[in-house]
Image (cartoon, rainbow, N blue to C red):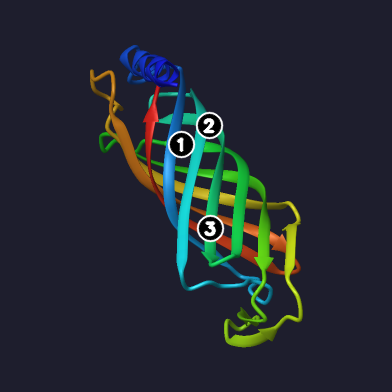
Amino acid sequence: MKKIILCFCFLLISFFAFAETDSIVRTDLGFSTGIPVYSHRDDTVTFEESRAIIGTFADISFKLGQPLRFLFGADVMSDFMWGGTDYNYHLDYAGWAGIKFYPGFGGLNFSISYALGSRTDFVSVTDKKLNFYDYNGSSIPYFKEESDTYVESTAWGNGFRISFDYDFLYGNDNSFAPALGGYYRCMPRGNDNWDNIFAVYISFGF
């Protein structure tokens, strides 16, 4: 296991060591966290004990000119809520394509993309009384006679993704530097419901 980890680290360092600052084709890998806001909350169980929100994304971009790049990629945001034996996990995933623009302030850049994605919920309820939410966000009591476990996915929706970051690798001679930024992704889920994903991230290009 240690040899596998060392080999992986060696390959990762090799990618960064030979990275070009403004190459024609570039790949970025990022890790994120944030706040997903769900518009459809009447069937969302909430647990006070524990919550973790983690995500990742990858994209590949092609140089169109000095300030412009065409990019496409995919991201996943995982929202884990649990308490005791009960849990409510949300797995949000989307693919996207768009344009990245560097306005001339160093590595500062913005992008806007078309996004296509869905969300899958993994729910297990064993308590007889839990807090559910109605469409207005007000807490209502919900009684269950027996345990309930299910997996359910939303409809695929067409949305958009807006991001900004500062790319410390852009326009300098370094072979390795991160980018720090954030994105907002708006996704329709069907029946006039929308999810709004607000995230911050760190990414690395090679």
Q: Which residue is mark 2?
A: 71
Q: Is residue 140 left or right of residue 56?
A: right
Quadrant for residue 122, please give it: bottom right
Q: Secondary structure at mark 3?
A: strand
Q: Mark 2 or mark 1, which is nearer the start of the sequence?
A: 2
Give the residue type at disc 3.
Answer: Phe
Residue 159: give x, y in percent of width and height.
63, 53
Q: Secondary structure at mark 2?
A: strand
- Spatial CA distance of label 3 from label 1 is 31 Å
Residue found 53% across the figure and 57% down from its top: 79
Residue found 55% across the figure and 38% down from its top: 98
- Spatial CA distance of label 3 from label 2 is 29 Å
Residue 152: give x, y in percent of width and height.
74, 58
- Residue toward you, 151 or 37: 151
Residue 74: give x, y in percent of width and height.
57, 38
Quadrant for residue 85, please give it: bottom right
Give the residue type at disc 2.
Answer: Leu
Which quarter shows the C terminus? Answer: top left
**Disc on res. 100:** 1
Which quarter shows the N terminus? Answer: top left
Give the residue type at disc 1.
Answer: Lys
Q: Secondary structure at mark 1?
A: strand
Q: Which residue is mark 3?
A: 80
Q: Are marks 1 and 2 in contact (CB under 8 Å)?
A: yes
Residue found 47% across the figure and 62% down from its top: 51
Residue 56: give x, y in percent of width and height.
49, 41
Quadrant for residue 114, please give it: top right
Q: Is residue 13 left or right of residue 36?
A: left
**Disc on res. 204:** none
Residue density around tag 2, few if under 14, some if 14–19, many if 20 or more, within 10 Å: many
